[in-house]
Amino acid sequence: MKKPTLGVHLIIRNEAALLPQCLDSLSGAADEIVIVDTGSTDDSISVAERYGAKVCRMNWNHNFSEARNTGLSHAQTEWSLVLDADEILKTPLREITDMLQNTSAMAYTVNIENWLGSSPEERLTHSVIRLFRNGKGFSFDGIIHEGLDASIIGKHGASVIHSSNIEITHLGYLPGLMAQKNKVSRNEQLLRLALGKEPDNPFYSYNLAVTCCQNGQLEEAAELLSRTIQQAPLQVSYRPAMIRDLGKIYLALNNMKRIDALLARELQRYSDYPDLHFIQGQSWESQGLIERACQSYERAAAGSEAALSQETALSGKYVSEKGMNSFRPLTRLGENSLQLGHTEEAARWFHRALQHHSTYGPALQGIASAFQRLNVPDPEISTLLIQLAGTEQPAGRSAVIRALESVHAYETIAGLPRAGFPLEWETLPAIISAWMITGQLQEAGAALREALPLLKQETDRDRDITRQLWIIHAICRWQEDRQQTESYGFLDAPEPLRSGLLLIGESLARQASAPAPAAPGDAGEHSLVVTELIRQAVKLRCFGLAAELAGLFPEHRAELAEALYEAGQLEAAGELLITLAAGGQTGGKGSFYLAEMLFDQGHYGEAAEWFRHMLDTAPADNPSRIGLSLSYLHLAKQELEGAEASFPELYTQGPLQEDIAAVHQAIAVLNRTAWHTQWTANQNIQGGAAR
């Protein structure tokens, strides 16, 4: 039987950089390629013509459907497959034409995996109609996020739309591409224009809410979604995604009551939607209702074993983040088991999660923490991590080192064999830091000198890693000799980091050579560099250097206090926090850390004052709210127990005892939330006990 002909259709505008990988994914198997160009000023058209595409030029009228339908008017094949220039077809076209040989379908949905970042877990999947018969009068509708659904269903009903296993990778949501093409601003403009014409269109309202989220306008997004969910028909395909998005917004706004009310109703309709169960679990967890949270996570992961036996992830029915039915809820089950003190059970949950995603950072870090709590030596933990994640690929090696770093196993990192763990860009900061922390300054210095030529180059490498290495490089050299400044290469650092390092280096040199302490300076525009240096110096256990920097730039003493506290240096942090508090200079997390220390010492009234102070500057800070609530509960408990003790013959059983029991229960619930700073066994807590 003769195979049906299949054409591929695209809209482009200045897509010369992305178009080749899109057209390469067709492997030359398309019967025709129709491309509508809406005003390219780069080489997009010549690139398209090199691949044999038929290019139609048209003016951009701020209407995607118009451009799509223009392309359809030039179609000569029996079937059309729609792609975007920032997409890659993963399913071979020949497999698609084989599928089309004997079918009664008018159209097919395809599975699109949207890349949101570089990590394998940063993926969002959804299905949409992209493959359909030509010559049936179908046309796209909508000036943005255009679709064929209404046209096909209006002519033939929904039964002619079949699901397929066709897979497409969409790169357009990667942060770099979003910023480069200014997509958020463009989409908002088009959506507001569309709503001006059709104010009651729920699809446009939904997508405007998504755009508001991308812009950080969460309150407006929540209002739009809440209203749209009430207005949209129950049967619209995107309704479950609206519930999911609204739940995630409520989480970000810390509005758990609204989540619980929303999902109490909607989980009855979408009981097989793992993302909703996961969001419900997060809500219960944040309220200290750990058993309920675990039940929700288990429901989300109900199909995890089935998913493990399949070659491809479950997809098609709902918009879903990768791993929502497997490694994500399994990892949360592990974290909750740790919170409850069920360490061996936690390790089992983490192990199950890693069967689905062997380099998933939270699961690897969780299993490392669990085994550390079980008193397993760090080298043995390292061996386990290597077995789980593998070290054949850079991603595996990086995941192992990050997990060891999360439990502060620096001696183990420093001892990893170079043959199995060569110096690589992703792991270089962690390995050099481990060498410095364990006193191997010579090895650290040699590795930094080896990396300097790469640091000097303007490449597409991760700029955060480059900046971190420059900061570590400065600390390493200053730790050896405070008087070294520009002679070892700060002139090659990118601006404004270069001038910041030079200024700070010169200040340290003057301090080291002056007979009397130098007068405090002002970091000015280089304040961020000073903050990074202080925090990194504390992490590298160069406490003397960190203190000198804070002495040279006193406005950064609060950062020093916070970094010391986070590193477990509680005595030094406490003294500095008290000094800063006396001068009204606590800032950032300082108020919270001071409140925590007072709380841990049983000074609940004073702790409450500092938790309130933190909330004055950060009203949405949930740990501070929980700390404040616990402080008041402990004060109430003391008063009630005092009353009970004062009149034992009167209060043996009754309302007072019931109130005391209720306060105890409330304290127990809130203590099960992850509100308090945690330290690892390797942090050698100074001046206090780790919780």
Image: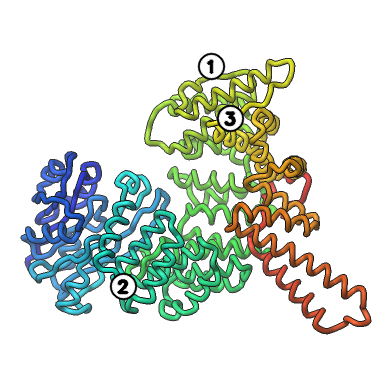
Label disc, if present, on residue 240 of the rendered structure? none
The residue pinned by badge 1 equals 487
Q: Earlier in the sequence, mark 2 or mark 3?
A: 2
Applied colour scheme = rainbow
In three-dimensional space, the C-alpha distance between marks 1 and 3, rounded to whole angstroms, equals 21 Å
Residue at the image point whose x is 36% and y is 53% from the top: 115
Percent coordinates x, y for residue 225 in the rendering: 40, 68
The residue pinned by badge 2 equals 237
Res 327 visible = yes
* Nearer-the-camera pick, 596 or 403: 596
Q: In this view, does 674 lie above or below 243?
A: above
Percent coordinates x, y for residue 507 in the rendering: 62, 22
| Amino acid type at image mark 2 | Ser
Q: Do the residues labelled 1 and 3 touch (CB within 8 Å)?
A: no
| Amino acid type at image mark 3 | Ala
Q: Residues within 10 Å of mark 2 (few under 14, many from 20)?
A: some
Q: Which of marks 1 and 3 is nearer the N terminus?
A: 1
Q: Are marks 2 and 1 in contact (CB under 8 Å)?
A: no
Residue extending farthest front: 196
Q: In this view, does 288 lie above or below 464?
A: below
In three-dimensional space, the C-alpha distance between marks 2 and 1, rounded to whole angstroms, equals 63 Å
Residue at the image point whose x is 48% and y is 75% from the top: 263
Quick one: SS at disc 1? Answer: helix
The residue pinned by badge 3 equals 523
Quarter holding the N terminus is: bottom left
Image quarter of residue 546: top right
Q: In this view, does 521 lie to the left or right of 78?
A: right
Percent coordinates x, y for residue 321 in the rendering: 41, 62
Q: Earlier in the sequence, mark 2 or mark 1?
A: 2
Residue at the image point whose x is 67% and y is 26% from the top: 520
Quarter holding the C terminus is: bottom right
| Amino acid type at image mark 1 | Ser
